[in-house]
Image (spheres, rainbow, N blue to C red):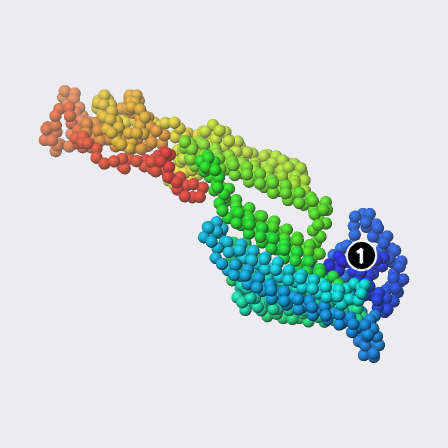
Amino acid sequence: MLLAALLYLNTAGAQTPPSSEPGIAPASAAQLADLLENEKTRKQLIEQLRAQAPAAQQALSGEAANASTGNSLDDSLPRRVADSTQFFLTKLLNDVGDAAAAIGAMARGESTGAVGMADWKSALVNFALVIAATVIAFILLRLLAARIFSLINRWAAQPAPALARRRLAQPATLKKIAAVIGALIVDIAAIALAGVVGYSVALAVAEPEATVGTFESLFVNAFVAVEIARALVRTVFATRFPQLRLFTMRDEVAMYWNGWLCSLVGITGYGMLVVVPVVTALFTAALGNLVGLLIMLGMYIYALRVVWNNRTLIRERIVERANQASTAFFATLLRLLARVWHILAIIYFTVLLVVSQVDPVDALPFMARATVQSLVAIALGLLVSAILTAILSHPIRLSDELRVRLPLLEARVNSYVPATLKGLRFITLIIVVLFVLDAWHAFDLSAWVMSESGRATISAAVHVAIILLFAALAWTIIASIIESRLSGTGNRAPSAREKTLLSLFRNAALIVIITMTILILLSQIGINIGPLIAGAGVVGLAIGFGAQKLVQDIITGIFIQLENGMNVNDVVEAGGVFGTVEKMTIRSVGIRTMDGGYHLIPFSSVDVVANHMRDFSYHMGEYTIAHRENVDDAIEHLRAAFAELMQDEVLSPEILEEITIPGVTAINERGVTIRVLIKTTPGMQWAVQRGYNRLVKKHFNAANIELPYPHTVVYFGQDKDGNAPSARVDLGRKAEQAQTPKGKAPAAGHTPRKLAPRRGGSEDVLGNELEQRVPDEDGNGEADDSLRSGPIS
């Protein structure tokens, strides 16, 4: 808690000429004058200076050496805190002792001040006249200002016109801010006029050819400073005029906090700026310091008591306000403030107490400047954050032409808005924290900005922001172009090869952009990336030797992609696995077989790729008939089956050419084999095969064409004529066979039927060719009627 006060003491002392005595902490001119005014402390100071003269000379030499090397031990934070603490405690003990001595002298009737008893009355009378004139003038001016406040309050309470409500999101807010600022200007003007009246009375009661007295000048200056501070308090907690209140709150709450803060500011300000200097001038500096300590100690205890008693109530009200916040950022800040507000208040009043005793003359001005700078920095930070939120809350709209060419670009740009808003708020928060620390002399912001390290840090931050901006812009453009092409928003839908290559290129571009961005950022923040690149090269070489299989996978995969060997949703045979390609990377291919198994095959294991989905396909069927059947009749029935297949509404569009029958391809012990070729679209050969086989069986049955099966012939020997007829086992069918025309006996196991028109659709031959579903990267199925794959048998 004492850190801000001690840092302030050191800063104030640093502005005075440095003392040649290293054992004394730096102090302001007023404090040194107080020390020298007391005879006891003056003698002690002289003795310390004479005793420490050699050490002082040695210290000066050391400081010169440190200055030549750029190091300063005396400027270190621990040394400053220790010296300031020692000075504060020493001065406090001396003041208590001197005050006790002065009170004892007054009790004995001895004169302790520079002003005699006769002069007291004249000075105090003039002082009282100035006080009375100033206070009366202020009361009258406040009554006049109250009428103006009433007019402004009524104006702010009037509803905004309908046109303004349509034009502005919250016109009442802007009107209220204008009213609050106007009331503050009127209040400060009344204070200034009352100060002019007081100063005029001070000139009037002064002796001829004399300036304004010290007491009168002290009071007028203190009056203006204290009342301006109280005017700022009244701006926040306007008790009589709700529309002039900066924040919305109940009247009893405003009256409580306005009365407490105005009393605290008034007693502290008039006590330290008027009472303490008057007591010091009439009696001794030690007695004045003791009076100041008592005043500040009383105000400190009173303030801590009020803060501690209201900590829970204020926390609940701040949390309630956070729940009504329009943005999550402000809600988070308010909730954080609700938890620590009483701690911050206790630290503030503790610093005020310590600073008022360390440097009574400059304590209140320092606290006022630090408080105002902190509040202004916080208010500007909140204002900037609110402006950023208002600007970025609306979606970014691109031109119609650009949306047509890159339909996904607008959505991608808008997806960056939350991260950009968080980054800008974080930068704003850092700047506000630096200004607050500078206000309390904990950090010299101006010196740091002008220093080499400060300029380097700011330059690096700007360069990093530019690099990130260009990286995001490059990735946005590349990804938007690729995704627009993949989504098929153009005039032509992307092919499977384009989808595969564009996906691989998008991933490669992302890796390159991230790698280059990281390397450039490391170089901008001062890290030498030369050894990093060299090390990466060595590691890559080692990995290349140790992972030759991986390198082979990648190289083979690149060439397969460049040569368009396979694409996603193709039916291929690779690495001994037959199935549908579901996923391809630069190193491996994932194939789903007909039994549902997923096979991940590295490209180094792929010697031959058999792609059944390239350009067109063939149903190559080989139909074997018995040796006793006529080949030409069988071919005619094969053509008849194809003619009926061409009448199918689903399968006929998938057939590209007329049926081709090369002829007999084999004659063996089973029978005669006839080959049939039907040219189809890619992936539909299996559906055509199933439909055509069904019709072939139908037509062969109707024509009594035997499809061969194993035969067994039994011989019972020869007759007298040398004949050896085979045995007829099925003798019970003589009557049926007798009715069969000659040469038209049905084949065993066949049931001849007449041909009938086909009824129904193609549901009995179609598999999944027209409804191919391949899981995407998220595991969801995506229907694509243009993709054909999957032999279903």
Task: Return the residue nearer the eye: 765 or 250.
Answer: 250
Residue beneath disc 1: 16
Quadrant of the rendering where the N terminus is positioned: bottom right
Element class at badge 1: loop
Quadrant of the rendering where the C terminus is positioned: top left
- Residue 232 lies left or right of residue 36; in this view the side is left
Q: Position of residue 299 (x, y in %)?
A: 67, 69
Mark 1 is surrounded, within 10 Å at the Cα level, by few (under 14), some (14 to 19) or many (20 or more) other residues, namely few
Kindly tell me whether residue 88 is visible in this rendering. Answer: no
Task: Return the residue nearer the eye: 20 or 460.
Answer: 20
Location of residue 662 (image quadrant): top left
- Residue 142 lies left or right of residue 590; in this view the side is right
Query: In this view, which residue lies farthest toward the top?
Result: 721
Location of residue 297 (image quadrant): bottom right
Q: Amino acid at mark 1?
A: Thr
- Residue 630 lies left or right of residue 402; in this view the side is left
Depicted 739 relative to depicted 363: above or below = above
**Identity of the residue drawn at 78% across and 72% down:** 122
Instruction: Please state the total of marks drawn on the protein image.
Output: 1
- Residue 622 lies left or right of residue 110; in this view the side is left
Kindly tell me whether residue 153 is visible in this rendering. Answer: yes
Q: Position of residue 530 (x, y in %)?
A: 67, 37
Depicted 120 relative to depicted 5: above or below = below
**Identity of the residue drawn at 82% across and 65% down:** 35
Q: Position of residue 591 (x, y in %)?
A: 42, 37
Q: Position of residue 170 (x, y in %)?
A: 50, 53
**Identity of the residue drawn at 12% across and 25% down:** 741
**Identity of the residue drawn at 61% across and 60% down:** 186
